[in-house]
Image: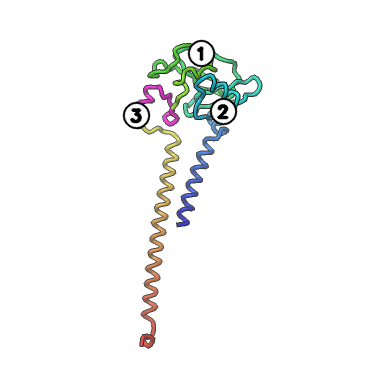
Amino acid sequence: MTCVCVLLLICALILQKGNSVNMTRKSLQVQLGYRFQIYPVDVCPKNKVDFDTAAKNRNCPGESRYLCAPDKNLTNLIEFCTDRPPSLYGPDNCVRLEGTGDLNHFHCVDSFISGCPNEAYIDEEIYKFPACLEINRVFQCFEAEESCKERISNGSTPDNGSNAILIFAIYCAFLTVMFVIGTLLWIYRKGENQKDYLQLEKSHVPSFVHK
């Protein structure tokens, strides 16, 4: 039983290590190819008060400015300190952080069910349009997109790294089950062998012992 627990612990540690490595800021920055540090967050600010608070907490150095936006693959919301001056974006567009770290238009008027910006805005006011900051990390899409909602409701399986983790977890579980079965069979056979040995020893005891 101890061996089983050790095996489960090893599998859990491997999975945990893999997840932590994949989600470190540095590895994500390298993977996405940005020229500056990025900070994955659960949500971006949804109003000016929250934006100003987050900017103060991030404390961007020098002439850089705080921003928060989806990454180029729509897998993370990220805070970062941009070295670009404020930019104006036209209506019918959200933004994504593309290239080496520049916000680029994402034309949403034809794909969003609702929430696509209906007026021009500067990048620091993206919080005025919450739909531009709500993504489905698994399906890598904006939640307001009609196709995104259809994929979620249909339960289709995305082709990304989460599948590999699931497969590895199943493999660990399979190995654990096989190990348990093998251990039980070994214990059973050992008991049978001991039983046979005792019967053999008993059969060789001289008859005068029983008199």
3D distance between C-alphas at marks 1 and 3:
32 Å
Q: Which quadrant would the N terminus be assigned to in this image?
A: bottom left
Magenta segment boundaries in residue numbering: 136-154
Hey, what amino acid is under mark 3? Ser
Q: Is residue 167 magenta?
A: no
| Residue underneath mark 3 | 153
User: In the image as oriented, which residue stretches furthest toward the left?
Assistant: 154
| Residue underneath mark 1 | 121
Instruction: Tell me whether the residue at label 2 lies in contact with that at label 3, contact meaning CB atoms closer than 8 angstroms.
Output: no
Query: Disc number at residue 142?
Result: none
Locate residue 170: give its quadrant: top left
Instruction: Tell me whether the residue at label 2 lies in contact with that at label 1, contact meaning CB atoms closer than 8 angstroms.
Output: no
- Of the two numbered discs 2 and 1 on the same chain, state the one appearing first in sequence: 2
| Residue underneath mark 2 | 38
Q: Residue at x 50, y 49 (%)?
A: 10
3D distance between C-alphas at marks 2 and 3:
31 Å
Q: Position of residue 50 (x, y in %)?
A: 54, 23
3D distance between C-alphas at marks 2 and 1:
23 Å
Q: Position of residue 7 (x, y in %)?
A: 47, 52
Q: Position of residue 135 (x, y in %)?
A: 45, 26
Locate residue 151: give its quadrant: top left
Hey, what amino acid is under mark 1? Tyr
